[in-house]
Image: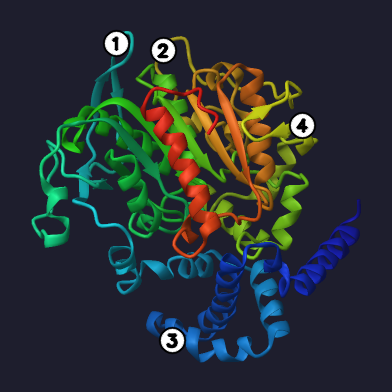
Amino acid sequence: VSNGIIVAYDEAIRLMACITTTRSTAVYPDSIANSLRVINLMMAAYGEAFTRHNNTAVRAAGLVLYGAKYYTNPQLKARQVVDLSKNQHIEFAKSFWQLNENQLLRHVPSLVCNSVAVNQTIQVKMEVINIHNNDNKLMVIPYPGNNPNAVINMRLLSYHARKGQEVNKFITFMTTLQYREMPYSKGIVIHFHGGGFIAQSSKSHEIYLRSWVRNLDVPVVSIDYTLSPEASFPYAIEECFYAYCWILQHISLMGSTAEYVCLTGDSAGATLAVCVAMRAAEYGLRIPDGIVCSYPAFMFRNAASPSRCLCYFDPLLQQGFLSSCLSAYLGESFDISQEEEIAAVSNGIGMIHQDNVINGNLSNQSNHVDGQHKTANRSGNPKPILSLTDHLLDNPYLSPLLADDNLLSKIPSIRINACDLDPILDDSIAFARRLKRIGVDVQIRFFSGLPHGFLNFVYISEEAAAASDIIVDQMKAILSGDNNSNS
């Protein structure tokens, strides 16, 4: 196909996207649709402010200054959003999706969400960890990168104060009972937040984590990995795996015995959760008892699939944002176009027929993907992640869908929660089929009418809150040892 035809087709798609942007939220529940309209309005206004001004405070003020213009002219707003999607630079994407991290909005979860007895930021100076694997062999976990002064931050949340935890001394009358020291919890949840690897933190994700902590009644540790482009692949994975090992070695400080360990994450965080389990399996360490993924990404290529076409119309996950996140995550010096010419193998998504998959169960029909790289070497010591493949886009820790069967067969039970209108829906379907074929306990749940990132809407949408409750039930099943639950 000539470049001219490709450019013309791309422009036609973007024109249709511009036409449909003003109505794209109509497929969602009213509570979410209204929020998405506000986000699109903010994006349009902030885009203009970001272009015109360099001062952070002035840019934030531009939400009001330019917002009125786009509010009164929906067509102008749609054009601005589409143009931002087409030419979205990483600086803008990172700045816009970090707006809820400013000093004012960071306190919203504390005001509107469930109170917790423990909300502790833990800063760990990363040193080499010596830990015994399942064969009692001493394994050495190096710290990520080459910076001996590096630290990793994590947030410990617990609804009740438990033995071993450092309890907040600011006790209010209404929550006094929460501060009576409880015994160690048998379970623990390790959480990895989403944000396209470029934005967000454990603090902003408290909007749903606080309710999870209350409903699960086990400690939750959320990892604040280093964001891109400041740290490129695979630094975040190495940090999260390091944090996983550190938590297991210091489990009493978390207020748990870790009899049951559940990994969970949303979007990019779901990818990290799977990668941590894969890395633990490579090292022969204890793997978690289960993984709960929400709207995950398992294929980091511009792979053609039906759901990927939705990125031209999605109010949140536009093509420009996806490309910016991928470029930032891979590193500034990485040339995606050159690597795509090399990566001519099956993308693992192929032909997806959703009628062969129903909630909780999958048909035996599968998309066969042969692993093309062996991640374990004969010495038993795992290779560095970057050395696993010759070409970066073939790396199984970048795209878990490309991992070989031997490695994927070692990950624990996994529950995948997908949205029927999510541009990366096909990643979930293909990955679930792959795991089903090799005998991994996998269940996939489809949520209709919810967008990518719906967990951030739990306090304004009954539908999002109901979906969050289902996810909590999945974690409860893992934390009770009942991995066969169809929740």
Residue 152 place in picture, x, y as percent? 28, 46
Residue 308 place in picture, x, y as percent? 72, 50
Q: Residues within 10 Å of mark 3 (few under 14, many from 20)?
A: some
Q: Mark 4 points at which residue?
A: 356
Give whichever of discs 1 and 3 has the lower sequence position: 3
Q: Residues within 10 Å of mark 4 (few under 14, many from 20)?
A: some
Under mark 4, the amino acid is Asn
| C-alpha distance separating marks 1 and 3 | 57 Å
Can you tell which of label 2 and label 1 is closer to the viewer? 1
Q: Between 392 and 19, which is closer to the camera in this rendering?
A: 19
Q: Where 50 falls versus 25 (above or below)?
A: below
Residue 414 place in picture, x, y as percent? 51, 29
| C-alpha distance separating marks 4 and 1 | 43 Å
Q: Residues within 10 Å of mark 2 (few under 14, many from 20)?
A: few
Q: Name the residue under label 1.
A: 137
Query: Which numbered disc covers residue 428?
Result: none
Q: Can residue 233 be seen in this view?
A: no
Q: Which residue is drawn at 30% across and 57% down?
A: 114
Give whichever of discs 2 and 3 has the lower sequence position: 3
Q: Between 415 and 103, which is closer to the camera in this rendering?
A: 415
Pointer 2 with pointer 1, Cβ within 8 A: yes
Q: Name the residue under label 3.
A: 61
Under mark 3, the amino acid is Ala
| Label 2: which secondary element | loop
| Label 1: which secondary element | loop
Under mark 1, the amino acid is Lys
